[in-house]
Image (cartoon, rainbow, N blue to C red):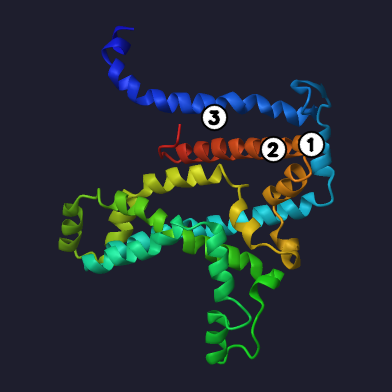
Amino acid sequence: MQSVWNNRYLYLFVLPGIVWFLVFAYQPMYGVLIAFKDYDIIKGVFRSEWVGLAHFRELFGSPNFPVLLRNTISISVLKMLFGFPAPILLALLLNEVRSRLFKRLAQSVSYMPFFVSWVVITGIWYDLFSVDGGFINQTLAGLGLIKEPVFWFGNPDYFWGMILASDIWKGIGFGTIIFLASITSVNPELYESAVVDGANRWRQVWHITLPAIRATIILLFILNIAHFLDAGFEQIYAMQNNMVLDRAEIIDTYVMKVGVFRANYELATAVGLFKSIIGLILLVTANFIVKRFGEDGVF
C-alpha cells in the first residue's frame, strides 16, 4: 500500500483508461445473456425467459451459414496473406529511399486514404472502375487488354479481389508508420559493420532490418489473428450489392440485416459471442505457438 501511495500521481494517469474499460468494455458484458434468452425489451435481460442454445442452433442450422462462413474466412485469409505483409514491404522499401523529400511525400500519399471513410472510398472506387468512362476500363481498353468495359462490381468473381485491393490501398500507409518506427530503432552501426563484411542491401534487410522488427511483426500478427472473423464490416457493407451477394455476404453483414434490422437481437448476440470465442481461441493458440518458438507473445 505504501508503494501505491508513493506512486499515486502515476496511477491517476491510468485512472481514465481504467474507468473507460469498466464502463464501455466490462459493464456491457452482461448483455451476452441475451444469446441464451427469449429477449423481451420490456422485461429486460434478467427477466426474459431462458431458451438455452436455441439461437446458436438457429445460426448453425441456417442454410445461409455455410456461405457466410466461407465468405468470411476466405476474405480474412486473403487479407492476412496479402494485406498484412503489404505495410511491412512498403516500410522496407521506404527505408531504402535516400531522398527525405520523396520519402515524406510517399508516406503522406500512402496514409491519407486511412482517414477517409469507407463510404467515400467506395464512391471513389466505383468511379475508377465504372463501366461508363471509368479510368481502369479506359486504360485497359487503350492498352488493348479488353474489348468491352468490365462491370467489376457486378461480377462475383472479381469481388474478393476488389475487397483485397481497396483494403490494402486504404490501410497500407498507416500500417507502414508502425514498422518504420520500429526500423528507426535499429543501430546504424550494424549496417556499417555489414557493409564492411561485404553485405549488399538485400543481405542487410534480411539479416538486420527484418530481425529488428520481428517482435513488432509477431505482436501485430497475434492481434490481427484474434480478429480473424472480422472480415471488414464497413468495407463490405458499403461495397456489396445484390449481384455479388453470394460472395459478399459475410457474418457481420448478415447479422446487421437479420439481427438488427429485424430486431432479432438474440441472434445478433449469439453471433457476436460465437465470434468472440473463436477469436479468443485463435489468440491463445497463436500466442502459445509463438512462445513455443522462443518469441515474446502478447502474454
Residue 179's spot in the image, x, y percent?
A: 35, 52
Judge left or right: residue 125 versus residue 178.
Answer: right
**Mark number, residue 1:** none
Using the image as rendered, state which of residue 28 and residue 208 is in the foreground. 28
Query: At numbered mark 3, what does the secondary structure look like: helix, strand or loop?
Result: helix
Kindly indicate the quadrant of the structure image that contains residue 40: top right
Q: Position of residue 15 (x, y in %)?
A: 39, 22
- Given the current orientation, which residue lies at the most extreme top position? 2
Given residues 7 and 215, the one toward you in this image is 7
Would you name the residue on which mark 3 appears? 24
Mark with earlier residue (1, 2): 1
Q: Quick one: SS at disc 2?
A: helix
Q: Earlier in the sequence, mark 3 or mark 2?
A: 3
Position of residue 27 relative to residue 259, above or below, is above
Report the mark closest to the observer, 3 or 2. Answer: 3
Q: Given this view, does label 3 or label 1 mark the residue nearer the observer?
A: 3
Image quadrant for the C terminus? Answer: top left
Q: Are marks 1 and 2 in contact (CB under 8 Å)?
A: yes
Check the picture and name the quadrant holding the N terminus: top left
Mark 2 lies on residue: 274
Residue 97 screen position, x and y as percent: 26, 67
User: What is the CA distance from the residue labelled 3 to the residue labelled 1?
Assistant: 25 Å
Q: How many discs appear?
A: 3
Neighbor class of circle 2 (other Cα within 10 Å; few <14, some 14-19, many 20+) is: some
Q: Which residue is mark 1?
A: 56
Mark toward the start of the polypeptide (3 vs 1): 3
Question: CB atoms at circles 3 and 2 under 8 Å apart?
Answer: no
